[in-house]
Amino acid sequence: MGKMILSAVCLILFSTAVLADEVPGNIVQKAAKTWNNPKAMMLLDVTRAGDRIVAVGEHGVAILSDDGGKTYTQAKTMPADCTLTAVTFADAKNGWAVGHWGVIVATTDGGENWQLQHVDTAVDQPLFSVAFKNANEGWAVGLWSLLLHTQDGGKTWTREYLQAPAGSKKADKNLNKIFLDHSGNIFIAGESGMVLRSKDSGKSWVYLKTGYTGSFWTGIATSNGALYVGGLRGSFYRSKDSGATWKALDLGSKASVTGMIEQAGQLSGVALDGYTFSGGIDATVFVSKQSGNRAAFTALVVNKEGQLVITSKEGVVAK
């Protein structure tokens, strides 16, 4: 498909553009390379596998840290040489990562070795997010309302089809982030201010009205039952009633929100242009700060010492 240069992280995160050398044949025939400095690669998501930190990104890179983010090693095996956009773990051993070309890879040893579970080289319909209820049941979502479901840990993935939202003939909106609340309800944040909710493990979905018309890139359900979604130009909304009503909150910046996490009753997040923000999960005011290098932050996680570890377009952000 030729080489394409991505000019902005928003295109990297939410488009069908591919990186150099990322073509269908390479994805299914060539494993990810071993890099001299993998923590400096473009990383799009980060999570915890027990105490271990696992981050994924361009060219199928997956990096691991067992000392809270001080040092990293690259995964021993990765069967897909394509951009990985998201990663999640059901426990310390069982995890999944998703990415371009509908790729889903899985690990049963905490991220050391990965196996290919799904790929579709007929069209580059990337997956943007993945979430698991337990080690067996999970969902992956992506471009043009792509929704995949597994009930056997990813041995088989089944495509499921959403009903069209009101005023549309078909469901074709991008699904950017899937997450669960503590009651097991599933939420999907997407473009056009869209949030979907399922209370029956994905058997049926309801489109929730947020009052926003731009794209949401990320979302989280906090321990007090609140829902937060964020995205373009600092858009940041909260619901205290499982998505029935939403209120816009001010982050103090217009940087696009890319990730959020809860820690001890505090909500922390990252955005493009080197912004971080924080506030209590019941707060009405959140404080934003900008780093000196204005790196394009992509995701964050809390290490076992309670410190934030942030990833970016330039790799792991130095502490």
Image (cartoon, rainbow, N blue to C red):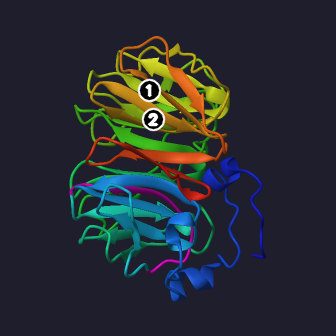
In depth, the one of 1 and 226 nearer the eye is 226
Disc number at residue 204?
Answer: none
**Residue at image location 60% in from the left, 50% down from the top:** 144
The Cα–Cα distance between marks 1 and 2, rounded to whole angstroms, is 5 Å
Q: Is residue 160 above or below residue 179?
A: below
Q: Does 253 sit left or right of 261 as displayed?
A: right
Q: Is residue 130 magenta?
A: no
For badge 1, the amino acid type reads Tyr
User: How dense is the environment of label 2, judged by Cα within 10 Å: few (below 14), some, or many (20 and up)?
Assistant: many
**Residue at image location 71% in from the left, 74% down from the top:** 20
In depth, the one of 125 and 277 nearer the eye is 277
* Residue placed furthest toward the bottom: 29
Q: Position of residue 286 (x, y in %)?
A: 50, 19
Disc number at residue 219?
Answer: 2
Q: Is residue 269 above or below residue 303?
A: above
Q: Quadrant of residue 221?
A: top left
Give the residues drawn in magenta, as a range.
Answer: 79-91
Disc number at residue 228?
Answer: 1
- The answer to whether the residue labelled 1 contacts the one labelled 2, judged by CB atoms less than 8 Å apart, is yes
The N terminus: image quadrant: bottom right
**Residue at image location 49% in from the left, 77% down from the top:** 80
Q: Position of residue 75 (x, y in %)?
A: 38, 75
Q: Is residue 311 above or below residue 115?
A: above
User: How dense is the environment of label 1, judged by Cα within 10 Å: few (below 14), some, or many (20 and up)?
Assistant: many
**Secondary structure under the numbered disc 1 in the rendered image:** strand
Label whose residue precedes the other's in the sequence (1 or 2): 2
**Secondary structure under the numbered disc 2 in the rendered image:** strand
Q: Position of residue 280 (x, y in %)?
A: 37, 19
For badge 2, the amino acid type reads Gly
Q: Position of residue 186 (x, y in %)?
A: 34, 37
Q: Quadrant of residue 79?
A: bottom left
